[in-house]
Amino acid sequence: MENPAKARGASVARATAETEISLRLDLDGSGRASVSTGIGFLDHMLTAFARHALFDLEVQAKGDLHIDAHHTTEDIGIVLGQAIAQALGEKRGIRRFGQALVPMDEALVEAAIDLSGRAHLAWSVAFAAPKVGTMDTELFEEFFRALAGNARLTLHLTQRAGQNTHHVAEACFKAAARALRMAVEPDPRAGGAVPSTKGTL
């Protein structure tokens, strides 16, 4: 039987005509991050994500940023989602569900996660500005959709308040991180069982 307390990590690489990405993930880390995507604000968000999820995360990405940041952002979401799925394995002994309500000054964002094996993103977030730094704000939805799809998890992100684009985006990443941290945690009462009546996730 898989021991849910053992180190859970994954390394994933993805190379296409648009991007080249390598990523290492440890779910049982301490929040250390080394991130270089070529997109300053995305580096900031992924570093915050790792810190609040207590994951150790390394990301090196090169993409066609001379076009825009779309391919790089989406493909990092894909690779991170794949790494989460690999690191979780059979998902024995985990809590499965996670939730967080995170304030960032005037912004307030709620995240709820189910490591269900079913990919779904429910996105109820609106940005007052089309960009934050050099990054298009519409790309945050693309990132989380790619993450949910490849980690095979259900993620609801709901903005409760906020106008400042930076604050809303940061609250999204921190809330998702906190919810995911809860969901992947070993449940001491689970006894290594898969948290589903079906016996598999």
Image: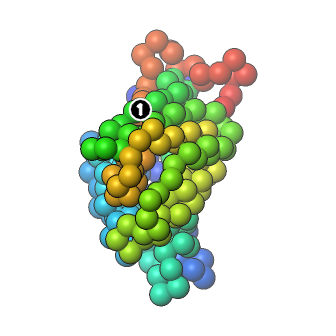
Q: Which residue is mark 1?
A: 100
Report the side of 192 relative to 182 (left or right): right
Task: Give 10 or 101, whichever is nearer the viewer.
Answer: 101
Q: Element at badge 1?
A: strand
Q: Quadrant of the N terminus?
A: top right
**Residue 199 to residue 111: above or below:** above
Residue at (46% x, 57% y) in the render: 127
Q: Residue furthest bottom?
A: 66
Residue 102 in the image: state x and y as whole percent: 36, 37
Residue 197 in the image: state x and y as whole percent: 69, 17
Q: Where is residue 37, by image quadrant? A: bottom left
**Residue 20 to residue 7: above or below:** below
Residue 150 in the image: state x and y as whole percent: 61, 52
**Residue 66 to residue 73: above or below:** below
Q: Residue furthest right?
A: 198
Q: Can residue 27 be seen by looking at this rendering? A: no
Residue 2 in the image: state x and y as whole percent: 53, 29
